[in-house]
Image (cartoon, rainbow, N blue to C red):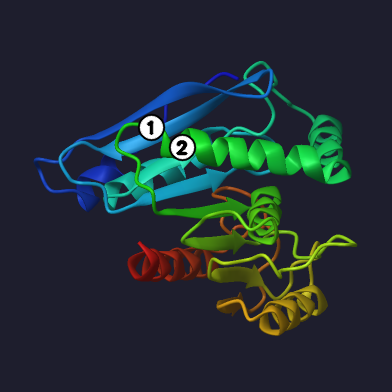
Amino acid sequence: MTFRPILMAALLAAALPASAEITGAPFDYTVGDTVYEGYVARNTAAEPRGTVLIIHDWDGLGDYEMRRAEMLAAMGYTAVAADLYGKDVEPTTTDEYRALTGALYGDRDEFRTRLMGSLMAARALDGATEEVVAIGYCFGGAAVLEMARAGADLSGVVSFHGGLTTPEGQDYSQTTAPVLVLHGSADPVSGMADLAALLDQLQAAGVEHDAQVFGGARHSFTVFGSRDYDIDAEQGSWQALTAFLGDQL
């Protein structure tokens, strides 16, 4: 995949002390026989507060995830954006996005292999910590819930406007990490019935959990520039993430 520059100077200057420096760079890692290309951002002037693993939306790892990684690095976290498609895979159309995500939804073992491999790669990076919170947006939100159901060794799981349905044959009996769901009440992909069912499952499994619902927010409410972008919901969900990271890392 091709990484493009991200213009965040004003944001980072406002968020950081003068001595801090945010660095971001791609890195390669291998899961099975496939090479993947992730992105890691750090604050080199501070001891890491913990590690945040970011799972991308259905269009793959790109500027949005890198921007979020740098925002987290500005807060003192080692932020690692994973790649679930492969270094040489650069989808550009809705049909390609649908095919890639559909292949993973259709092969849950492979889905989990890539997720767990990305988690292992993140922990192996310089500046990473053993304590990791996994977060994801849209497709990534569904992916981190897959990690939770797989019993991934995590300190927390956060889904932003993710797919909330549980596949047949799966449950949350192996989940050990607290789960936070950040969702819009007008999301046409996973509606309030899906959210209620998820919360019932987490409660029945004894999983520590919480949810914040943003009234009127649609799907992709955190995605800058999208037709669904909702500044109040985006900022509110980021504040909820910040508090959750403070508690778990």
Disc 2 on helix, strand or loop?
helix
Q: Nearer the viewer, residue 200 or 60?
A: 200
Location of residue 8 in the rendering, given as x and y in whole percent from the top left corner:
34, 38
In the displayed structure image, the side of residue 126 where residue 225 appears, left or right: right
Mark 1 closeness class: few <14, some 14–19, many ≥20 residues within 10 Å = few
Q: Specify whether residue 110 is in view.
A: yes
Residue type indicated by callout 2: Ala
Distance (Cα) linking label 1 and label 2: 6 Å
Q: Specify whether residue 4 is in view.
A: no
Location of residue 83 in the rendering, given as x and y in whole percent from the top left corner:
60, 32
Q: Quadrant of residue 60?
A: top right
Disc 1 on helix, strand or loop?
loop
Residue 182 numbered tag? none
Residue drawn 61% across the image and 42% down it = 116
What residue is pinned by disc 1? 125
Location of residue 216 in the rendering, given as x and y in whole percent from the top left corner:
67, 75
Q: Quadrant of the N terminus?
A: top right
Q: Is residue 112 above or below residue 210?
A: above
Residue drawn 64% across the image and 69% down it = 183
Mark 2 closeness class: few <14, some 14–19, many ≥20 residues within 10 Å = many
In the displayed structure image, the side of residue 247 where residue 32 appears, left or right: right
Residue type indicated by callout 1: Leu
What residue is pinned by disc 2? 122
Q: Nearer the viewer, residue 73 or 50?
A: 50
Residue drawn 49% across the image and 46% down it = 53
